[in-house]
Amino acid sequence: MRVSAYILVCVLLVGVSFAADPADKIFISEVLYDPDASSPPPFIELYNAAKTNVDLSEWRVRIASKRGLERVALEKGQEKVVIPNHGFYLIGREQDRDAWSKYSYKPDFYCDLSMDFMKGEGGIILEHASGQKRDAVGWGPVRWPYYEGTQYPGVSPGHGLERKSGPTHNEVNGNSYDTGDNLTDFRERAKPQPQNINSPRESPAANTEGNAWGRIKAMYYNQ
């Protein structure tokens, strides 16, 4: 009983520490990995479910692409990279800067990643510069650690892969549903919706706040 109680207390403490750290509420919210002629260029979108702005300067994105492993730090020289509370942050490719000119919401950060995702399989990791994994999404038979739980099977060309707001998705409640399983947490979006720091803020659904156990399983038990 003492051992079980100790384990329970440790799990609860880990859950509390997650809830207390604003950076733990940054999610990969939408990915366009297989664009077509009618869609925007490829992008990675992040969502901040925390009530405070979060500095992303020591964070980075890692992707599994046709080039192999690619990694980019989320920083602009000496400038802080901040994602607003209940807001979004949009990452695009430097080579697509001109192509984004016709869209109302353009990337906040243009990176040198190729973003040539393997269309049948691929994945993205959001991690701290120390190597601490914060979030991941994978599709197809991509290898660990580029996914959580079960990989999403994939989406049609030109469609987005979007994190849901809750068990039933609501467009105005952000993208922070997290059970630790990509197949459960994401959905296919027929018309991608890239959002950046100037997009309307979206308050997270109340039912996304109680998924600490999903986070623990994904990060510590590789489930």
Image (spheres, rainbow, N blue to C red):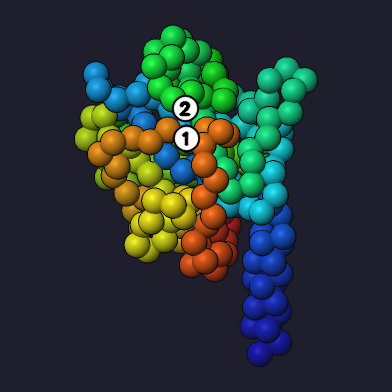
Which residue is depicted at the point 66% across and 59% down? 18
Q: Secondary structure at mark 1?
A: loop
> Can you name the residue that lies furthest to the left here?
156
Query: Image quarter for residue 19?
Result: bottom right
Q: Is residue 166 left or right of residue 134?
A: left
Which residue is depicted at the point 74% across and 28% down? 80
Query: Image quarter for residue 81?
Result: top right
Q: Nearer the viewer, residue 28 or 14?
A: 28
Q: Nearer the viewer, residue 78 or 119?
A: 78
Kindly identify which residue carries mark 2. 105
Do the residues bearing badges 2 and 1 touch, measured as CB atoms within 8 Å? Answer: yes
Using the rendered image of the protein, determine whether residue 9 is visible from the camera's viewpoint.
yes
Where does residue 82 sit, x and y in percent of width and height?
68, 35
Where does residue 167 sit, x and y in percent of width and height?
37, 63
Amino acid at dot 2: Tyr
Mark 2, Cα crowd under 10 Å, few <14 / some 14-19 / many 20+, is some
Give residue 195's mark: 1
Q: Secondary structure at mark 2?
A: loop
